[in-house]
Image (spheres, rainbow, N blue to C red):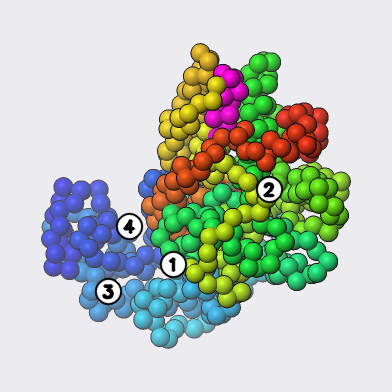
């Protein structure tokens, strides 16, 4: 422990602290921009490139960046002198001198950290002028847009992509004024092995990386009288959407969400959770099949499209390991355009399926041609939680005042098992609830397999079913997934089943969720809300979803049977 004095206040803090850490203890706010310290998620960016955290240290001639300056005993620091304030303001002015000033029409308007800092530091003019970079906008992919001119070279995206996700797509290229952050040779994103996990988008402080905006397409479709427009929303939306309307993280807004969708004019308001229950029916059968018939083990879950893309690009020799199940929203799209369309005599060609997802990769997934049935896509448009929030604001819907409503039947019926899909560990817990009952013939009362829960990036648990030990591995974040895959590749994996979600925390921490930047408490609160929503449900196992079982009886036939294979399963390409 050492003693330091900040703005006249003495604090005793651990020796390994930086000035920034010590300031937090002293209750002194020092603004930061490039700095990111998501401790639990192991996402730490300490490039000290933006210099907006400059402070005065007694006895030193120059200002020091608080985020990268270690403390020592007796250090005297001032953050509130005119010199320190001017230093911080100058750092922001320098960034702004090479940054477009189209804030009013920028996709990050009012959500941009640079803009917020300029306001906080009272920047009223930019005292530096000269050449400005103008780079082209990379909108080559279905999922994300890279707007290089808005990049402030903070390198947060690089940390997310390389250290957390181990994808290695983004790095700094060129030197000096020409420096850009991009893929090798600055290739278009679509020509790289980007998984579209969106974690770079989630941490970008400006609009240098954003999702492709598909809101105009949704408006156009809703206003086309010839189209029958159906919407579905993912499990993770209901515990995060409220944040966009000033609510606490973890506020559950399921009822208002359904009401809002109806106000927007969708013809049917369905729930991806129904698709998640179908996924469990198929995946549970598939796992039992592999266990009983000496099939390929471990079986990996397959609902996360960034994860599927990761395995295709980085472990092409292992594409026979994931479950062949399509993801829940794709299954729901398929069932809407087959089962529901047939039942209601609607031409599937007239149906437009819109998915609201916490995820950017779902945009690219929906466009995968191998998932199409009879030449039409199962899901036509995907928008993120953020895009959906923007639509509601555009429509002038007073979200807070909406009543609670239900999803439409039959494809809006869901169970607690499907809700927990939204968090890391939830998919495998939902599967275990069903596998347990099917393998034992019992109807287990206590459905909470708490050993499978947590937020840590790598977890494991063993579940005893009928005397058979089922060993389960769980990873969230692609870097963690890589570790489990290396074991599978070398034949050392001890698991029967592995759940993988690309985003830290699972879908609740998805790249399309409301921005939470440096606050990992937000993801934890969303997770608690997911479990709370599960507890509120009277039906908590997928095989108890009456509407799902009726669909099998009336239309699909045997779970994991021939028709199910045709409609609900896929294969992966190395
Ligand atoms: Fe997910 Fe899924 S849980 S992938 O995390 O399997 O995006 O929420 O919709 O499809 O159900 C995301 C969330 C989501 C699918 C389901
Ligand atoms: Fe890397 Fe994911 Fe961003 Fe692609 S979307 S560049 S894989 S962090």
What SS does tag 3 mark?
A: helix
Crowd tier of the residue under label 1, counting other residues whose Cα lies within 10 Å: few below 14, some 14–19, many 20 or above: few
Q: Mark 1: is the Cβ under 8 angstroms from ligand 1? A: no
Crowd tier of the residue under label 4, counting other residues whose Cα lies within 10 Å: few below 14, some 14–19, many 20 or above: some
The residue lying toward the viewer, choosing from 476 and 429, is 429
Residue at x 56% of width, y 35% of height:
541
Left or right: 460 in relation to 500: left
Is 396 part of what is drawn in magenta?
A: no
**Dot 1 and dot 2 residues touching (CB under 8 Å):** no
Frontmost of labels 2 and 3 is 2
In the image, residue 107 sits, relative to residue 532, either above or below, namely: below
Report whether residue 519 is seen: yes
The picture places residue 574, in percent across and down from the top left corner, at 73, 36
Frontmost of labels 4 and 2 is 2
What SS does tag 4 mark?
A: helix
Instruction: Name, please, the residue furthest toward the top.
Output: 467
Residue at x 52% of width, y 82% of height:
130
**Dot 4 and dot 1 residues touching (CB under 8 Å):** no
Q: Earlier in the sequence, mark 1 or mark 2?
A: 1
Is 435 part of what is drawn in magenta?
A: yes
Q: Which residue is mark 3?
A: 84
What SS does tag 2 mark?
A: loop
Q: Earlier in the sequence, mark 3 or mark 4?
A: 4
- Distance from the alpha carbon under mark 4 to that under mark 2: 53 Å
Q: Earlier in the sequence, mark 4 or mark 2?
A: 4
- Distance from the alpha carbon under mark 3 to that under mark 4: 16 Å
Q: Which residue is mark 2?
A: 411
């Amino acid at each position: 422990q050492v003693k330091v004095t900040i703005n006249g206040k003495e604090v005793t803090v651990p020796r390994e602290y930086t000035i920034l850490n010590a300031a937090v203890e002293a209750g002194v706010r020092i603004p930061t921009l490039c700095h990111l310290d998501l401790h639990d998620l192991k996402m730490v960016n300490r490039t000290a490139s933006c210099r907006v955290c400059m402070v005065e240290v007694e006895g030193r001639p120059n200002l020091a960046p608080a985020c990268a300056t270690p403390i020592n005993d007796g250090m005297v620091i001032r953050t509130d002198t005119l010199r320190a304030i001017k230093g911080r303001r100058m750092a922001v002015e320098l960034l702004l001198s090479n940054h477009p000033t189209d804030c009013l029409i920028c996709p990050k308007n009012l959500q941009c950290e640079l803009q917020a800092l300029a306001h906080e530091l009272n920047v009223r003019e930019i005292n530096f002028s000269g050449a400005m970079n103008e780079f082209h906008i990379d909108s080559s992919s279905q999922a994300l847009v890279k707007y290089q001119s808005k990049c402030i070279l903070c390198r947060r995206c690089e940390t997310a992509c390389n250290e957390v996700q181990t994808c290695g797509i983004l790095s700094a290229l060129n030197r000096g004024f020409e420096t850009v952050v991009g893929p090798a040779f600055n290739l278009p994103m679509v020509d790289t092995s980007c998984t579209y996990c969106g974690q770079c988008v989630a941490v970008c402080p400006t609009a240098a990386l954003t999702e492709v905006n598909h809101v105009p397409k949704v408006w156009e479709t809703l206003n086309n009288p010839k189209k029958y427009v159906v919407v579905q929303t993912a499990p993770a939306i209901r515990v995060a959407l409220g944040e966009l309307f000033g609510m606490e993280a973890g506020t559950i807004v399921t009822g208002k969400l359904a009401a809002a969708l109806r106000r927007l004019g969708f013809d049917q308001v369905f729930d991806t959770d129904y698709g998640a229950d179908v996924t469990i029916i198929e995946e549970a059968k598939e796992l039992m099949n592999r266990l009983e018939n000496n099939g390929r083990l471990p079986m990996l879950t397959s609902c996360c499209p960034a994860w599927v893309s990761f395995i295709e690009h980085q472990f092409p020799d292992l594409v026979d390991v994931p479950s062949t199940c399509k993801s829940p929203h794709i299954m729901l799209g398929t069932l809407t355009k087959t089962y529901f369309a047939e039942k209601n005599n609607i031409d599937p060609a007239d149906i437009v399926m819109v998915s609201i997802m916490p995820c950017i990769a779902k945009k690219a997934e929906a466009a995968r041609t191998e998932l199409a049935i009879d030449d039409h896509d199962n899901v036509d448009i995907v928008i993120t939680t953020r895009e959906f929030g923007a639509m509601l604001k555009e429509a002038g819907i007073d979200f807070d005042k909406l009543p609670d409503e239900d999803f439409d039947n039959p494809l809006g019926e869901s169970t607690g098992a499907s809700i927990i899909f939204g968090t890391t560990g939830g998919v495998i817990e939902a599967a275990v609830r069903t596998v347990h009952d099917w393998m034992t013939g019992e109807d287990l009362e206590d459905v909470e397999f708490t050993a499978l829960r947590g937020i840590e990036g790598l977890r494991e648990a063993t579940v005893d079913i009928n005397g058979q030990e089922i060993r389960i591995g769980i990873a969230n974040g692609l870097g963690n997934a890589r570790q489990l895959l290396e074991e599978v590749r070398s034949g050392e994996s001890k698991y029967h089943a592995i759940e993988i979600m690309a985003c830290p925390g699972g879908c609740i921490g998805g790249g399309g969720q409301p921005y939470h930047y440096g606050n990992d408490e937000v993801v934890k609160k969303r997770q608690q809300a997911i479990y709370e929503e599960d507890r509120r449900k009277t039906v908590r196992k997928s095989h108890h979803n009456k509407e799902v079982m009726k669909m099998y009886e009336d239309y699909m036939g045997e779970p994991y049977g021939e028709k199910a294979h045709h409609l609900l399963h896929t294969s992966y390409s190395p």
